[in-house]
Image: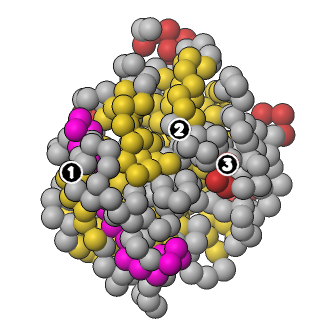
Amino acid sequence: MTKVRLRAYLGGVALAPALLAIAGPAGAANLNFVPTAQISLPNGQQIISFDISFVDPTIQLYILGDRTNKSVPVVQTSNNRFQVQLPANPPFTGATGNNNTSGPDGVITVRHQETWVGDGNSTVKVINLFNRQTTHVISTGGANRADELCVDPRDNVVLVANNAESPFPFATFISTTTYAVTDRITMDGTINGGSVLPTPKATNGIEQCQWDQETGHFFITVPEVNGPGDNSAPGAVLELNPVTHAIVHQFNIPLASCAGPQGLTIGPSPQILLGCNATANANNPTAIINKFNGSVVATINQQSGADEVWFNPGDGLYFLARSAAVGATQQLGIIDSATFASNSVFTANKNLPRNAHSLAADPILNQVYVPIPAGVSTICGSLGGSDAQGCIAVFTAQ
């Protein structure tokens, strides 16, 4: 399919310049972000239960795993207009009342042509962006959800975190050319799959993964290793070879800097920022580690409680969806990758399980997208939407 056809299908999306052409931040970063726009779903559809967000800047699209409406809403980032809701066939499991079986979950784009979506029944559904047709349904062989995903475009591999499997979670490797599962690593403390090293014994799931262009490897978080299941024991970051499926390194993360590492995003070399979902001490820290040796580069206080995290190369900032932030409100965390200065701004009141735990940033216009669930915030209404309906809020620097 040509880019011209994609642009026509999506209603005139202008293609963005390549990411390599984006200029880095100049001078001190502005950490004062405020909501400036909102996108509502059509026909009064509510946003209540959802999971992961993703931005593809090449085709200027934001997508979200929307469990409430069993779809993937698509937003054009150049003008923040709702485009379409992508269904699946067979349908997504939706919000089942059990997080382990709900979907859609993780979302990514592959080759700027397909949306790959983890679902609550251990499948990955591939949806064509041009015609909205489900082209493949790939079973990962478990009983519960296929959660977060990441893609290695060099070796044509998608890595899936099957985080809710019992007794232990596993990571699944899928070819983007054959759409077949090629391997699995079960995080049970043994040597299995393609690895020659023992896996960690993951006692509280596995979470966000990213592919790193510099090393050519995947990195994935393990919130807790060999603990009681409440993130009170230290977690780890695994480095995985996408070709051999071997564990290259296991970086153990000190509790003093990061309890319950959940989110993971790759920043300027050698940085990896972790979204630390638990609270280890009164400083409520999150951590930036060195991707080559696992050492802690920086511990940033009062930035814990994050689920999904994102690095924006357009302004050099990290963003953290701090839905479990200490206190009465949920927060959007902002950290400067150059100075490690930080700030947090309000996203929602604490009204779990409706939490603002998802985000993604657009590096072209330096916008941050945060889904706001219905009934927990005044942001949607203040921007012309409906607080009772919920919205996708757009934050920009002021």
Lower sequence index among marks 3 and 1: 3
Lower sequence index among marks 3 and 2: 3
Q: Is residue 234 magenta?
A: yes
The correct choice, above or below, for 217 with respect to 339 in the image is: above
Please give the name of the residue rendered at 72% of the width and 68% of the height, measured from the top-left corner. 352
Q: Is residue 214 visible?
A: yes
Q: Nearer the viewer, mark 3 or mark 1?
A: 1
User: Dominant secondary structure of the magenta stretch?
Assistant: loop
Distance from disc 2 to disc 1, alpha carbons, whole Å, reads 22 Å
In the picture of the structure, the residue carrying the numbered disc 1 is 196
In the picture of the structure, the residue carrying the numbered disc 2 is 141
Q: Is residue 313 visible?
A: no
Q: How is the image coloured?
A: secondary structure
SS at badge 3: helix
Please give the name of the residue rendered at 31% of the width and 79% of the height, measured from the top-left corner. 254
The correct choice, above or below, for 107 with respect to 390 in the image is: above
In the picture of the structure, the residue carrying the numbered disc 3 is 101
The correct choice, above or below, for 254 with respect to 188 in the image is: below
State the residue in front, 166 or 213. 166
Q: The residue under label 2 is which amino acid type?
A: Gly
Distance from disc 3 to disc 2, alpha carbons, whole Å, reads 14 Å
Task: Where is residue 359? Give x, y as percent.
Answer: 52, 52
Q: Which residues are magenta?
A: 228-244
Please give the name of the residue rendered at 53% of the width and 60% of the height, measured from the top-left corner. 167
Distance from disc 3 to disc 1, alpha carbons, whole Å, reads 31 Å
Q: Callout 3: 10 Å neighbours few (<14), some, many (20+)?
A: many
SS at badge 2: loop
Lower sequence index among marks 2 and 1: 2
Q: The residue under label 3 is which amino acid type?
A: Thr
